[in-house]
Image: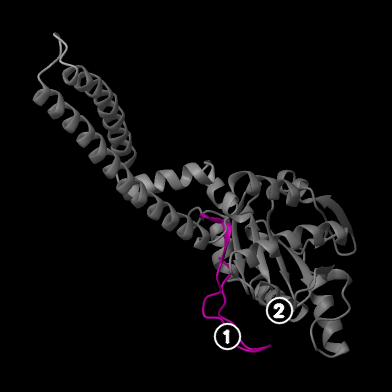
Amino acid sequence: MEAEEENAAVTGLSPTMYDKLRSEATAPFRSLRLFIYGGIGVGASLGGYTAVTQLVQSLQHRPDALPLSQSILNVGVDFGVAAAAAGAWVFENRLKQVTDKEMQALRAKEPFRLTFDMKKARERALSGLPVTFKVGLNETKSASVKDLREKGGQHLIVLAAPKGELADALFGARVGKTLFAKNNVMIAPFVIQGGNDKAGEEASSVKGFGGMSDKATGMKEAMIDSEAYVAKPAESASWATYIDEELEDAVRQGNEIARKTGIGIVMRKDGSIIRRGLGQPDWKEVVAELTGAKGTSEFGDAYVPPIGAGGGKGGKKKRKKG
């Protein structure tokens, strides 16, 4: 029920009103017809009460009474109309109930999407999280994501994935690392568990990626840590809470593989999250969208399913984070 209410809240309407509007669109003027049938039925019933009174007077042969035949006709007409209106109202109402149930069933099948208020709350939460980043060969600086955006003019891509997936994605980013510096884009990597466990530690504190050897792991970590476009999440508990909420959203949207493939959250420097995606990102496309080269995305309220999912660990994956 909670998920249904959140879904309907996307439109700014209550679930009941949302279903009424969809039902009305399916069967136009049904509410008006029900009102008319009800009004006719009530009017005819009142007329029938009057006609019965007149019939009694006719049976008593009162001087001012209508002819008996006329009184009987009036009673028959009034109660006939009332019965017909009642039958039409019952029939139309049954159709309405069937339509309402169909609307509820359709709404229950609709994927969960973040409401406007929920999106804004997540944007504020992410903006308040701390990161550390390199400002020189041997110097690092700490700041909130908000300061990174507003004072540093940086876009941010949060990438949360199991160690192996994260290492592959970050190494893929190194191939086009000049793309990030040129467009003021930073990546915040965060390691999560590959199963159903909660989010784990930030990438910088994890000893090793996947099943690689210690030597390979050390080389990869050193290479990744040296990049100026990497903003390392600090205060892992705060980041874990945020990432867990995002993972839960992805699962509620039908993406049960989110904890295995990883998720990406793309935040523009104005503080708006313009895209949420699954799996390994296409860095060029993401940067192009951040800088406005590909227009504004409308995927900020739901996780885009993986495209062409496949390939084992270490294999080339075509999953695309929009």
Q: Quadrant of residue 135?
A: bottom right
Does residue 160 appear in the picture of this structure? yes
Magenta stretch holds residue 86: no
State which region is magenta: 298-322
- Counting from the top left corner in percent of width and height, residue 165 is at 71, 79
The kind of residue on which mark 1 rests is: Gly
- Counting from the top left corner in percent of width and height, residue 295 is at 48, 54
Q: Nearer the viewer, mark 2 or mark 1?
A: 1
Q: In this view, does 87 lie to the left or right of 231?
A: left
Q: Identify which residue, 17 or 265, lies in the foreground.
A: 17
Mark 1 = which residue?
310
- Depicted 142 relative to depicted 180: above or below: above
Does residue 153 appear in the picture of this structure? no
Instruction: For the C terminus, give its image quadrant.
Output: bottom right
* Predominant secondary structure, magenta span: loop
Q: What label sits on residue 46 in the rendered view?
A: none
Magenta stretch holds residue 301: yes
- Counting from the top left corner in percent of width and height, residue 134 is at 83, 60
Q: What element carries label 1?
A: loop
Q: In this view, does 67 lie to the left or right of 19?
A: left
Q: Identify which residue, 210 or 292, lies in the foreground.
A: 210
Number of residues whose C-alpha sits closer than 10 Å to that of mark 2, classed few (under 14), some (14–19) or many (20 or more): many
Q: Is residue 219 left or right of residue 66?
A: right
Residue at (72%, 44%) from the top-left corner? 150
Kindly give the residue lying farthest to the top in the view shown. Answer: 63
- Counting from the top left corner in percent of width and height, residue 216 is at 82, 87
Q: What label sits on residue 165 in the rendered view?
A: 2
Label 2 close to label 1 by CB (< 8 Å): no
Residue at (30%, 29%) from the top-left corner? 39
- Depicted 77 relative to depicted 9: above or below: above
Q: Is mark 2 on a helix, strand or loop?
A: helix
